[in-house]
Image (cartoon, helix red, strand yellow):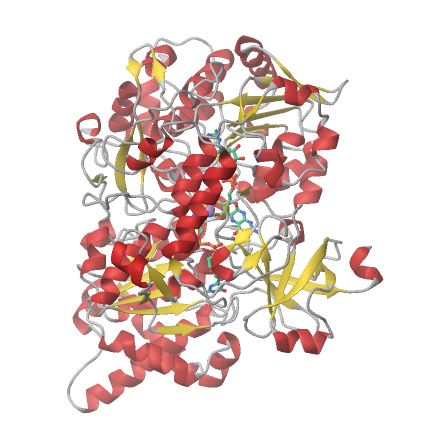
Amino acid sequence: MADRDTVHYDGPAGGWGSLRGITRIFGKELPAPGVLDTLAHQNKPGGFMCTSCAWTKPAHHNPLEFCENGAKATLWELTTRRCTPDFFAGHTLCELKGWSDHDLEQQGRLTHPLRYDRETDRYLPCSWEEAFAAIGDNLKRLDPQSAVFYTSGRASLETAYLYQLFARLYGTNNLPDSSNMCHETTSISLKKVIGASVGTSVFEDFSACDAIFFFGQNTGSNSPRFLHPLQEAVKRGCRIVAFNPVVEKGLVAMINPQSPTEMLTGHETPISSHYLQVKAGGDIAAIMGLCKHVLDREDEARARGESVLDHDFIARHTHDFEAFTDKIRATSWEEIEDNSGLTRDALREAGEVYVEAERVIGIYGMGLTQQVHGFDNVAMLVNLLLMKGNIGRDGTGISPVRGHSNVQGQRTVGISEKPELVPMDKLARLFGFSPPMEKGLNTVETCEGVLAGTVKAFIGLGGNFLRAIPEQEAVAEAWQRLELTVQIATKLNRSHLVPGRAAYLLPCLGRSEEDRQAGGPQTVTMEDTFSCIHGSVGRRKPASEHLLSEPAIVAGIAKAVLAPNPKLRWDDWVGDYGKVRDLIEATYPQEFRGFNERLFTPGGFYRGNSARERIWKTASGKAEFTVPKELSATGFEDRPGRYRLITLRSNDQFNTTIYGYSDRLRGIEGTRDVLLINPDDMARAGLAEGQVVALASDADDGRERRVGGLKVLPFDLPDGCLGGYYPELNPLIPLSHHDVQSKTPAAKAVPVRILTGAAASG
Ligand SMILES: Nc1nc2c(c(=O)[nH]1)N[C@H]1C(S)=C(S)[C@@H](COP(=O)(O)OP(=O)(O)OC[C@H]3O[C@@H](n4cnc5c(=O)[nH]c(N)nc54)[C@H](O)[C@@H]3O)O[C@H]1N2
Ligand SMILES: Nc1nc2c(c(=O)[nH]1)N[C@H]1C(S)=C(S)[C@@H](COP(=O)(O)OP(=O)(O)OC[C@H]3O[C@@H](n4cnc5c(=O)[nH]c(N)nc54)[C@H](O)[C@@H]3O)O[C@H]1N2
Ligand SMILES: [Mo]
């Protein structure tokens, strides 16, 4: 792997750097001709919807409604490189295990259905008929409760609906999803406290808010098109307050690459007015500090006969306010400072922005959700918003920024291991069967089942499960004992290198490619982070003539497993996805009314959110104030030598897909094998820049976990916090280290030790 020296980048987000990022990928990905035309239609009505993040596709779009990372994702899919049976003839899986994630995917698009051959340790081409028949035979032999049907958040609403239907007809709710590692904390927390499992803000709210509070979301890298409405908001006087242990460039300043004036003059817009480098896991305490300041100002205002709080809203719409304020008053500034790593002055200043703002949006990402007390993180942010009625009014709201392009939508149409979230009665009526009612396995429980030997088959609809999960090494070891593994994918990744006893690698169309079926070219649909649903039409020539669409693969497997039933018209559904949309509408009539007529609505059609209407579908019928049990979200005690490791994404990756080794916005170039640590901690630990060290798990379960070969790099982080990259550092995360309520792996504060000398290389 390239291991060039690390250089620092001091420019703002966007600007020439982002254009250079795109052109560099152009050179590397060798895209087919006509790609620029495809990019010009990206994220616009009638075009195709970006496969990168879930940011919305606005009705009034920019001339080019794509960003550096969206362009990278499209070019990644449209590469001219092909990973053919010849490639597999030349490499055993044992050999490929020594390759980097980057080099595996760099082989290009998979072209043929493949079967694993144990004798030669290679993938061999096979026919689709052979693959479906063998998968069918295996699944029919197994207990449905021992099979798992994973989805990565990219598959369309149509594919997702057919997939969950198939799993339930087969007899299981084992439908884990990438959101189990991501915003599952959101689904559980928001459902409990406001009665809706998704965010309440919509795009227009960003034109009306006075302040935005940002917690642990890295806009510049992960949802760059969001920088445009942010820049507009700042220009009209909205204030942005960011809480993040890392000073992320995109939250500091930006140059709009779509503005010729800004590009030519280098004029940048500052984004955050306040930037608070909270400790990893310190947000519960930090938000407590903000709330404490608001209460103090309320007391002062009351003495003048005025008020800061929205008393009318609190009385009519919320529950348990007293218990919450008692807790805030009982918590001292010393405890808050200690647990957040922030001074009370800094928190008071930020709190004052909240007090002064009439309309506030609370934004958050993985910094809040991937914590042991992630539930309390999210509930605390809701507490803050409720104090001044900042939910259910224009220009306000709680706004989780979702990850994969359709991860939210998949849950909407039934990808869930929780039967109570799915309209089983409707499925029963539509398809004439008794759906399973046992709770299914989520991602962490799937890993537990693989380790225990109770999970025997894994079907992966996209994604890179074995690389994305915690406790990678132990799970990969046990994985080889699975009876059946099936991976539906566009490119080769590390999960494909660990086959079960019978193993199939099935290549599918990408979203930018033309999906032609019996009924002609097909459209698919996605739901964005604001619950708006968009049609997407691929027009590119498929990477290989042997590819099938995801719906066709799901149907192929389903037909091989299930007994024929006149209500299951798999061929008709695959021939015309409009018929699948009719089924979605019949199952979810309220959200998907007139689905086929509305799918090209500019800006998407909104499926609605009760909490936005101030209808609270909670236990009390009101929005819930919550009292957090802990002030620290880490779930472990601090002690000498123990650090909080934050696993980060670079600007040059999409999850486990590594585009390259340039984390431009953080100035880390040429390598991902780094350990980021602040200079004071470095000195205290006696480390030198460039020294190679290892990290070891410091969990109290006595299990050995270690990742070596990490180069020490001084970096601006709070004391006691370390940074490094996901997925390389995933072997350090214990399976048991997850959000208490949702089981989302707690990848943003992992207890570790630093090993040096002989121990580092051992
Ligand atoms: N280019 C690109 N885009 C992507 C992705 C990608 O990998 N690459 N992934 C997609 C997916 S699936 C998702 S879920 C989203 C993820 O997007 P984000 O939600 O932005 O997730 P991360 O980048 O993992 O982490 C977000 C931020 O949390 C900060 N942080 C860490 N610990 C804490 C903490 O304790 N408190 C606070 N306040 N902050 C903390 C980190 O410094 C980081 O800036 O992006 C999506 N978009
Ligand atoms: N330590 C740590 N671990 C994490 C995280 C973290 O922040 N830190 N983040 C977590 C999060 S938020 C998430 S969402 C998960 C991500 O987990 P996953 O969603 O499982 O992983 P991805 O890396 O997005 O999957 C990439 C693969 O998807 C396949 N693919 C791409 N496009 C398509 C397509 O159109 N169809 C099909 N069938 N396959 C396709 C390609 O083969 C590619 O190799 O990781 C989680 N793990
Ligand atoms: Mo995610």
- Which residue lies at the image location 60% right of the left edge and 53% below the top edge? 670
**Residue placed most toward the observer, 133 or 445:** 133
Q: Position of residue 574 (x, y in %)?
A: 36, 16
Q: Nearer the viewer, residue 541 or 36?
A: 36
- Residue 335 in percent (x, y) is at 50, 81
Badge count: 0
* Residue 523 visible: yes
Q: Measured along the vertical axis of the image, is residue 301 above or below residue 625?
A: below
Closest to the observer, 477 or 214: 214
Instruction: Estimate the x, y position of residue 160 in percent, counting from the top left.
Output: 39, 29
Image point (36%, 74%), residue name: 274
Left or right position of 90 against 671:
right
Which quadrant of the structure image shows residue 605? top left
Residue at left 53%, top 27%?
Answer: 81
Considering every residue shown, the one lying at the far front of the view is 264
Query: Residue extending furthest bottom?
Result: 303
Q: In which quarter of the image is the C terminus?
A: bottom right
Q: In this view, does 724 lie above or below 24?
A: below
Q: In which quarter of the image is the N terminus?
A: top right
Q: In which quarter of the image is residue 412?
A: top left
Q: Residue 507: give x, y in percent of width and height.
A: 52, 22
Is residue 373 visible in this depiction of the protein?
Answer: no
Residue furthest to the right in view is 758
| Left or right: 672 as drawn, with respect to 220 | right
Q: Residue at x 16, y 70 (%)?
A: 312
- In this rendering, is residue 363 above or below 597? below
Give the camera-side residue of 328 and 338.
338
